[in-house]
Image (cartoon, grey):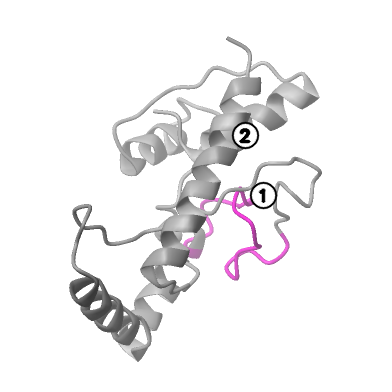
Amino acid sequence: QLGGAHVVIARAFQKEGVEAIHVPFNNGPEAITAFRGGNIDMVAQSDYAVLLDAGEIKILAETGPERLPAAPDAPTFRELGYEVSPAIFYGIGGPAGLPPEIVGRWESLVKEATETEQFRALLARLKLIPAYLPSKEFRDGALSDYRLIGEAIGKMPK
């Protein structure tokens, strides 16, 4: 369970000489429950909207490439001097070799959906940053981030 946010934080801790124990969870709500219960000291999680709105948590820094509109004063890890800041993204995938006309149709449908007021309102409620990319750009970005994460993992202590 080594995701982008975990790698960014682990590399920052390593650079600063902070010793920490990674506690894996099956999902975000489990991790947040453990955090709220005082069982862990921090959490890197994207399922925080309700707690942020209730004033129960504070975002200290963002692991992704840009600041969050919901926490504009929280710097990114890159702004703090750490070299890895992969985007955390959601996408729709299909089998390899999908005909271009099918890919194109899905791209059109997804782009259209992401431009609706309902979708934008949902993202705002969830504190997510809207960003549509066609399949090639999305794939290239994902592969680039995977390479960054892989390089960072290679630099982590064994």
- From the viewer's perspective, tell me whether residue 147 is left or right of residue 46: right
Local secondary structure at mark 1: loop
Residue at image coords 79%, 46%: 80
Taking the image as shown, residue 109 lies to the left or right of residue 72, namely: left
Q: Position of residue 104 (x, y in %)?
A: 27, 78
Residue type at numbered disc 1: Ala
Relative image position of residue 155 (x, y in whole percent): 66, 21
Label at residue 61: 1
Q: Which mark is residue 6?
A: none
Q: Residues within 10 Å of mark 1 (few under 14, many from 20)?
A: many
- Disc ID at residue 9: 2
Q: Residue at (41%, 65%) from the top-left corner? A: 136
Image vertical order of residue 144 relative to residue 12, above or below: below
Magenta residue check for 35: no
**Nearest the camera: 136 or 42?**
136
Mark 2 is surrounded, within 10 Å at the Cα level, by few (under 14), some (14 to 19) or many (20 or more) other residues, namely some
Reply above or below: 42 against 75: above
Provide the residue span drawn in magenta: 53-73
Q: Residue at x 47, y 65 (%)?
A: 137
Figure disc tally? 2
